[in-house]
Image (cartoon, grey):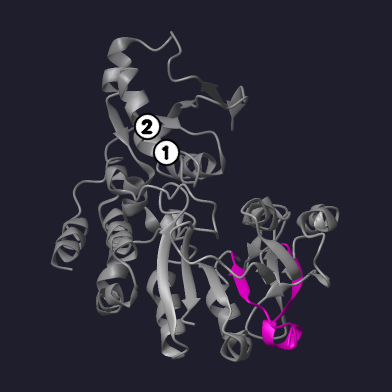
Amino acid sequence: MTGLIHKLESALDLQQDPLREKREVYLYGAGTTGQDVIRLLNGKGINVLAVLDSKSALQSLDGIPVLRPNDGRFSESERGQALVVMGIFNAFVPMPRLLTELYAMGWKNITGFLELHRYNSDALGDRYWLTTPMYYQRTSSLWQDAKGIWDDEESRGLYESILKFRFTGNYDDAPVPNSDTQYCPCNLPRWNSKLRFIDCGAFDGDTLEGIGREGYSFDAVAVFEPDAANLRKLAGRILELAPSASPAILWPCGVFSGITQLRFASGKGAGSSINRGGETVVQCISIDEALSDFKPNLIKMDIEGAELDALLGARKTIEKHRPSLAICVYHHPAHLWQIPNLIKSWNLDYKLYLRAHCYNGFDVVMYAVPNQ
């Protein structure tokens, strides 16, 4: 891991804040992250001349005009000299391609969101896996030790690639997404042909739909979805998505380490989550308490950062039935090593694999497959 240590040391050797001495900038991205960046810039007394966005239908954002980056009103000189601050941080935009397009349009001075966050992490806060390089310095012994936990070369290489990307903030270092259906990687052993499936964070049934397209059928399903709008969509589709499942159980709850009520940020689609600042309160329950006799052979968790607690609340079920596991490990910086270390510490003879399914460090999944 010597190369990664060097990358971390380089990240800690911070250069000058790209916003220092700036009074005017352009912002790229009219979404939620872009709005957060506008607030940051306003707080620094920096004027946003325009929001650039190739796809947004908005005419303005917070009173700032939204324009296409190839708009003819931008002069060649302006594009070559102005600073463009990127306000994009999501799973679906291939950033190297977007940056190449902007450079080709003549925008030459671009600061990425990861670089911006590095110098303004207190104001912007941790976001999914994104945190300060200092965090990795404090936890270096933990993430270094975890490289050897993975059971194939692809996983070990991906683990290093993810950490390198986090340290450098360079999108050219970002892992290339696996093109397989998420939760069904083709180069891992297939799941049981008759699934007894627990879906934690079921959203609108997209995982059930994806697994069904891969030729699996469901003997039984139990799905957990605390967001009321998502659950309504799911309830309307469950018989179509899992027609052979008996039973098909829908739990309007979050999954956690035990029975409790927690604040919840709802109405955000797939991003609804347990959140201290959430506007509602949801009931949470553990898998061990809710499904003591379900006998699962596959458990999936995509629950916006609650995965570690939910696994602790499923330990008895996992120890008794040794189901395959598909657990997201990108919602919190340390989950990349904490979650596989937790499973390994239970000594249940699992093989552990790591795959990335979206851009920019998102949708990274640990797959735990029991040895037969």
**Which of the 4 quarters of the picture holds residue 355?**
bottom left
Q: Residue at 30% across / 50% down in the picture?
A: 169
- Tell me if residue 232 comes above or below residue 341 in the rendering: above
Crowd band around label 1 with a 10 angstrom C-alpha radius: few (<14), some (14–19), many (20+): some
**Which of the 4 quarters of the picture holds residue 40?**
top left
Direction from residue 131 to residue 141 in the image, left or right: left
Direction from residue 279 to residue 127 in the image, left or right: left
Q: Quadrant of the N terminus?
A: bottom left
Q: What label sits on residue 38 in the rendered view?
A: none
Identified by mark 2, the residue type is Arg
- Tell me if residue 248 comes above or below residue 296 in the rendering: above
- The reply to whether the C-beta atoms of the residues labelled 2 and 1 are less than 8 Å apart is yes
Q: What label sits on residue 97 in the rendered view?
A: 2
Q: Position of residue 158 (x, y in %)?
A: 32, 59
Identified by mark 1, the residue type is Pro
Magenta run includes residue 33: no
Q: Position of residue 86 (x, y in %)?
A: 40, 37
Q: Residue at 27% across / 25% down in the picture?
A: 108
Crowd band around label 2 with a 10 angstrom C-alpha radius: few (<14), some (14–19), many (20+): few
Q: Can residue 334 be seen?
A: no
